[in-house]
Amino acid sequence: MQIQAVLFDLDNTLTHRDQSVQAYSRHLVEHYQNNIQPDALDTVINIIRRIDNGGYPKPELLTHASIAASVGYALQQQLNWNSMPELEALIAFWFRHFARLAVAMPGAEQLLQQLKSQNFKLGIISNGGHQTRLNILQGLGFLDYFDMVHSSELVGIRKPQPEIFIHTATCLDLAPQQCVFVGDHPINDMQGAQGAGMYALWLQGFHHSQQLLDVPKISQLDEVWHYLSV
């Protein structure tokens, strides 16, 4: 079947999660510069990296129900504050600023522009809160490229369950076999998309697999073009 849609994961596919963490950390340190030590930036980055874990937090490191609250609590406990902000303020700061400070993956916007100009349908399938997905895409200026943005919160199904991939294809009036899915995670993205019958492309550099996967690997986004005539 001819490919008619290109669907993407979000973190570490269209956005670079670690660079986004670094951008957020710089903004937080600047905002609270009168309350914390001037050399706190590296500590803040390391705290957030450890808890966030590339967007895949380890349950044992979450002290609260969300990454935002767990990060806020860790910042309270591990930084030397002159005047410690309330946890609620740090949580609100995360939700107000993290999404808008997201850093795009190299080549992401150029690829989206080119795909749109060639009349491919474009979509997002991402685990997480729906409004946060929209805020990230809006902050990057990417939202208008997409015909469909599906989050696990919106659909009620999480990757790697194939149903979220099938549901997205159906909403685009396409068969899964007419879709290419691009993602970074071997299970959530690759196994999930393949289980739904989609053609999957594994963006390398962020996750390793314990098993061999029969899936094409790409190292940068412009390589997607090589696989659109499958």
Image (cartoon, helix red, strand yellow):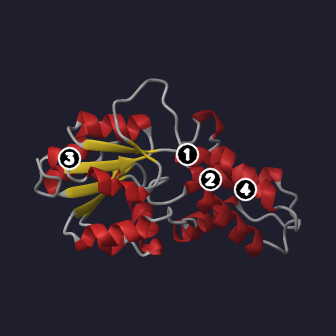
Please say whether residue 151 is visible from this viewpoint. Answer: yes
The residues tagged by marks 2 and 4 sit, at their Cα atoms, a distance apart of: 16 Å
Asked which secondary structure carries label 4, the reply is helix
The residues tagged by marks 1 and 3 sit, at their Cα atoms, a distance apart of: 42 Å
- For marks 1 and 4 on the same chain, the one whose residue lies earlier in the sequence: 4
Asked which secondary structure carries label 2, the reply is helix
- For marks 2 and 4 on the same chain, the one whose residue lies earlier in the sequence: 4
Q: Residue at x 65, y 38 (%)?
A: 61
> Residue 210 at x, y = what percent?
49, 25
Q: Are marks 1 and 3 in contact (CB under 8 Å)?
A: no
Q: Which residue is mark 1?
A: 65
Question: Mark 2, residues whose alpha carbon is within 10 Å: few (<14), some, or many (≥20)?
Answer: many
Q: Which residue is mark 2?
A: 69
Q: Are marks 2 and 1 in contact (CB under 8 Å)?
A: yes
Q: Are marks 1 and 4 in contact (CB under 8 Å)?
A: no
Q: Which residue is mark 3?
A: 230
Camera-side mark, 2 or 4: 4
